[in-house]
Image (cartoon, rainbow, N blue to C red):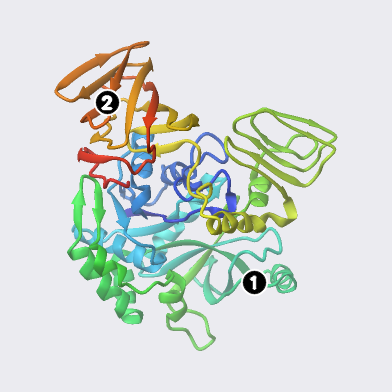
Amino acid sequence: MQLLPVILSGGSGSRLWPLSREAYPKQFLPLVGEQSLLQATVRRLDGVEGVDSLMKPLIVCNEAHRFLVAEQFRLMQREAMAIMLEPVGRNTAPALTLAALMAMASGEDPTMIVMPADHLIHREAEFRNVVSEGVRLAERQMVVTFGIVPVGAETGYGYIRKGAALACNGDTYRIDAFVEKPDLSTARQYLESGSYLWNSGLFMLKASLWLELLQTYRPDIASVCKDAFAKGTWDGNFFRPENKLFSTCPSDSIDYAVMEKLPVEADGTSVQAVVLPLDAGWSDVGAWSALWDVSEHDAEGNARDGDIFTHDARDNLLIAKHRMLAAVGVSNLIVVETPDAVLVLDKEKAQDVKAVTQYLRDASRDEHVFHKRVHRPWGNFEPIDEGKRYQVKRLTVDPGGCLSLQMHHHRAEHWIVVSGTARVTRGEETLLLSENQSTYIPLGTLHRLENPGRIPLEIIEVQSGSYLGEDDIQRFEDIYNRNSDD
C-alpha cells in the first residue's frame, strides 16, 4: 500500500503579521524550533507504520511561492514528487483534485493524506499511530478525517460531531455532522458534551475515491480541473495547470464540496466518512495567542524569542528579530519586533491584527506583502540605505545561484564583494571577483551575477540613477523562467 502526502501550502498567514507576510507566509517560518512549519509537515510522516511505500510528497502552492517551497526542500535535502502551482486560489477542493489527478497519472492509486502546510503537532509519534489506523480504514474505501480532541471552548474552529463508534474499532466514529464555528456559549456546551472534535482539515482517502466522489457531487469542479490538468505544463519539478481554464474553476472547500454531501444512515450518521480522534498537541498556529499557547514559557509565563529583557512582566509573547526588546511591568501582551515594523497587541485581541493589514492595503503600503529582506530564487536582498538618486542593498546569492542576464534603463550599479566568489558578466566581459574586489555596471549595460562557489556570496550593491524601482529590469535570460516582475 502506498501513502502519498499531499501538502496544501496556499495560506497567507496574515494573522501572524509582521512575521508572516504575503510574500513569505507562516508556513515558511520556524515559529517553534528550527524547522519551518512546512519542513515539519514534510518530515512528520517519517517512520509511519502500516504502509509499503511512503511516496515523495506532492505540494500544492501559490505560483508566487514556488521558489520558497523548492528552497525549503533543498535545505532539507529532500525531493518532492511535484510542486503544483495554482495560478489563482480556488480553495481546497480544486487543490486536492489536481493532486489526485497527478497521483493517478503516475499509474498508481495511492492513499492520500491531505495536510495543511502551516499546522503544528507536538507529539508526532502519536500522530503517526493515528495515521496508521487511518491507512487501514482508507484501504476499505472510507473517507477518513482527523478530529482534534478539544482542550478548551474554542470559537475559531469548526467542529465535527461524533456519531456511533465503528463495531470493528471503538476509537473510530461515524460522522454525525460538520458544525460551523460556534459562539462561546455553544463551544462550552460542545466541550462539556464530549461529543465534539475540532475539525483539523486533515483528511485521508484513495485518490480514485476522491475523484469519484467529486464527480458525483461537484461535476463542475471535476470537469474544469481535469481539463486544466490535461493541458498543464511542466517547468522542471513545477507543474502548472492551464491558467485560463483553472481560473474558471468554482471555489469550494473539501468539506462543502464532498464531505457534507455524503450519504447517511437512518440515524443520520455518514455511511462512508469516519473521524479518528487525534490528541497529539495540534495547533493551527492561527493567531499570536495560539503561538503563545504552544511555546515554552519562563517562570513568569513569558514566551521569548530573541534578545529579550523582562522585569515584573508576565504571560507575554515577546519576539525580537532585529534589536533588543525590554518589557517592564506589563502582562498579557504580544510584542513582535522586526526590522521594519513593531506590533504591540493585547493577547485577548489577537484576531484584530487584521485591522493592521487592512490599513496597509488601504494605504497602498507594502509592509503586509514584503519583509525588509526580500527573497528570490537565487537568494535574497535587503535594503541598507537610500536617498535621492541612490540606494544601497546587501545581496546574498546562494551557492549555484544565478541572477538573470539583465539590463537597467535608469540606474547604474557598483558591486563590492564582502565574502565568497562572484562571477560577473558585464557586457562582453566575464570577471571573477573575490573578497574586497568590486566592479561597476554602467547604465544600459547587459550584466549578470553568479555564485560559482560552495559558500553564500555576500555583495554590497550601490545603485545610482533617476529611478531605482525593482521593475526597472529587462531580462534576456533567466534559469528560473521568471517574468520581469517576478
Q: CA distance from mark 1 to mark 2?
A: 70 Å
Whichever of callouts 1 and 2 sits on the residue coming sooner in the sequence is 1
What residue sits 24% from the left and 15% below the top?
A: 432
Residue 320 x, y percent position in the rendering = 64, 34
Residue 291 x, y percent position in the rendering = 63, 47
What residue sits 25% from the left and 67% below the top?
A: 244
- In this rendering, is residue 414 above or below 123? above
Q: Is residue 60 visible?
A: no
Query: Looking at the image, which is closer to me, 157 or 345?
Result: 345
Disc number placed over residue 195 in the picture, else none: 1
Identify the element where label 1 is drawn. loop
Q: Which residue does the numbered mark 2 point to in the structure image? A: 442
Q: Residues within 10 Å of mark 2 (few under 14, many from 20)?
A: some
Identify the element where label 2 is drawn. loop
- In this rendering, is residue 392 above or below 269? above
Residue 325 x, y percent position in the rendering = 70, 32
* Quadrant in the picture for residue 113: bottom left
What residue sits 39% from the left and 41% below the top?
A: 469
Residue 178 x, y percent position in the rendering = 54, 75
Look at label 1 and name its amino acid.
Ser
Disc number placed over residue 209 in the picture, else none: none
What residue sits 38% from the left and 28% below the top?
A: 463
Query: Looking at the image, which is closer to me, 373 or 149?
Result: 373
Quarter of the figure with the N terminus: bottom left
- In this rendering, is residue 200 above or below 399? below
410 displayed left or right of 418: left
Q: Is residue 472 visible?
A: yes
485 displayed left or right of 127: left
Query: Looking at the image, which is closer to me, 130 or 368?
Result: 368
Query: Looking at the image, which is closer to me, 341 or 452?
Result: 341
Task: Judge depth for marks 1 and 2 and give the one in front.
Answer: 2
